[in-house]
Image (cartoon, rainbow, N blue to C red):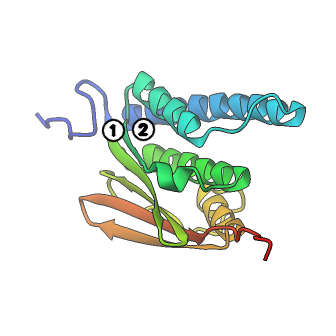
């Protein structure tokens, strides 16, 4: 008898586990879209400012509630407080798209999102324990990897992918902070 892998719950075949994971990711993506529409509605009426820390916390709670991913957040206040609203939104989208891709395609069970200030730059690292590389080089329209690249370009940033065979993947994104206009 073959024992289940560390990513495959006992009693489920690999195909059943993949279908289950795919359904969870689809449900989570739909939920995120609904929350996103609500946030955009609040922005238009000026009722509430976007809070990246709260949004990432909600994403963390959602993944842990469905039980397939333990996510650790390492958010440095010095980095979070200098982000523009647009930069914060792009970061949230990058995290959603990167984790959604990895959970769906690489059986990730643990992930860490780190955002810190590195001089005049913001450095974000998304690391996980999944199998196989993050598919950032696909050219399929609408693919999450293409969306991640597009968002990094919007931030005028760079991204680097580090794959450690059998030990997960790290996506590193860095971008310069918006210049602050100062009267002389």
Q: Is residue 15 above or below residue 35?
A: below
* Viewport quadrant of the N terminus: top left
Q: Residue at x 63, y 38 (%)?
A: 51
| Closer to us: 115 or 29 | 115
Q: Residue furthest front?
A: 184
Measured from the top left, where is residue 131 in percent x and y?
Answer: 32, 55
| Closer to us: 54 or 133 | 54
Q: Is residue 146 left or right of residue 9?
A: right
Measured from the top left, where is residue 18 in percent x and y?
Answer: 42, 38
Q: Which residue is mark 1?
A: 14
Q: Residue at x 31, y 58 (%)?
A: 168
| Closer to us: 160 or 102 | 160
Q: Which residue is mark 2?
A: 18
* Viewport quadrant of the C terminus: bottom right
- Describe the element under mark 2 as helix, strand or loop: helix
- C-alpha distance separating marks 1 and 2: 6 Å
Q: Quadrant of residue 34?
A: top right
| Closer to us: 114 or 60 | 114
Q: Is residue 85 left or right of residue 158?
A: right
Measured from the top left, where is residue 86 in percent x and y?
Answer: 73, 53
Measured from the top left, where is residue 148 in percent x and y?
Answer: 61, 60
Q: Given contact means CB atoms under 8 Å apart, are the residues at marks 1 and 2 in contact?
A: yes
Q: Quadrant of residue 141?
A: bottom right
């Amino acid at each position: 008898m073959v024992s289940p892998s560390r990513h495959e719950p006992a009693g489920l075949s690999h195909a059943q586990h993949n279908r289950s994971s795919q359904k969870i990711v689809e449900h989570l993506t739909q939920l995120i879209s609904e929350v996103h529409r609500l946030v955009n509605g609040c922005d238009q009426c000026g009722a509430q400012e976007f809070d990246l820390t709260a949004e990432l916390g909600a994403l963390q709670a959602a993944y842990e509630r469905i039980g397939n991913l333990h996510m650790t957040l390492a958010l440095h206040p010095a980095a979070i407080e200098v982000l523009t609203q647009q930069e914060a939104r792009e970061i949230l989208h990058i995290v959603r798209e990167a984790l959604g891709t990895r959970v769906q395609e690489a059986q990730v069970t643990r992930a860490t999102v780190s955002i810190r200030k590195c001089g005049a730059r913001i450095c974000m690292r998304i690391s996980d324990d999944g199998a196989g590389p993050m598919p950032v080089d696909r050219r399929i329209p609408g693919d999450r990897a293409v969306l991640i690249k597009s968002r990094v370009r919007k931030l005028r940033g760079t991204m680097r992918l580090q794959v450690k065979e059998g030990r997960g993947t790290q996506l590193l994104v860095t971008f310069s902070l918006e210049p602050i206009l100062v009267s002389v």
